[in-house]
Amino acid sequence: MDVHKLVKKCQKNNREAQSELFHLYKDVLFALSLKYCKNHDEAEDNLQDVFITIFKKIHQYKFKGSFEGWMKRITINKAIDKYKKTPFLDIELDENIITDTTIDPDIVQFPLDELLTFIQSLPDSYRLVFNLYEMDNYSHKEIAKMLNISEGTSKSNLHRAKVLLKKKIMSSNNCLKKIAISNGQ
């Protein structure tokens, strides 16, 4: 069934259509939830909240723009809303430890699942800004508005997220093995 017809049926509270829509998009929206949540359990909770919201608000979808994009915005906003309720802790780092946040891709090819684990382990404010900016291409101005922070805080949190990620990547056993192999050791 095409998505347009499926959405129309969901707007009429058709349970079979809702089930089909859930099964069609659950994996995509779960992967997106994983980017913004600390762990698998939080991502599952977020996904459940997302589909509740989608089915409550599906009548508001006016078939303008991508339906999947509409659902992705709901997914991101639901994850962010949970963190807005808890004030962010600002963690100070010694910026002199690492100032260059680039990693040479020729030296380091890193397993995606381990990188996701590192991203999930970032403090909430860093993880949200990192994902919004680097993975979903939001501007610092948009991020500041979404998270109720200043643009400067968004930029600072992005830099700090990159510093922490670089540190975790460079100290990882997978990275050290790859560097040793590329150096002929």
Image (cartoon, rainbow, N blue to C red):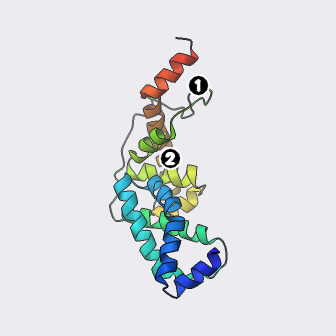
Q: 74 or 58: which is nearer to us? A: 58
Disc number for residue 134: none
Q: Label 1 vs label 2: CA separation?
A: 23 Å
- Which residue has dot 1 on it? 107
Locate residue 51: give its quadrant: bottom left
80 in relation to 18, above or below: above
Q: Could you tell me which residue is drawn at 38 percent across and 48 percent down?
A: 123
The residue at the far bottom in this view is: 12
Residue 109 vs residue 11, the one in the foreground: 11
Q: Is residue 84 visible?
A: no
Whole-percent x, y for residue 29 in the image? 50, 62
115 relative position to 41: left or right? right
* First reached walking from the N terminus: tag 1 or tag 2: 1
Mark 2 nearby-residue class (10 Å; few <14, some 14–19, many ≥20)? many
Res 29 visible = yes
Q: Quadrant of the N terminus?
A: bottom right
Residue 68 at x, y = what percent?
Answer: 59, 68
Nearer the camera: disc 1 or disc 2: 1
- Amino acid type at circle 1 is Ile
- Residue 127 coordinates in the image, percent (x, y): 44, 50
Residue 158's disc number: 2
Amino acid found under the numbered disc labelled 2: Leu
Q: Give coordinates of residue 143: x percent, y percent.
A: 53, 59
The residue sitting at 49% across, 77% down in the picture is 18
Which residue is painted at 52% across and 49% down in the image?
155
Categorize mark 1 by other alpha carbons within 10 Å: few (<14), some (14-19), many (20+): some
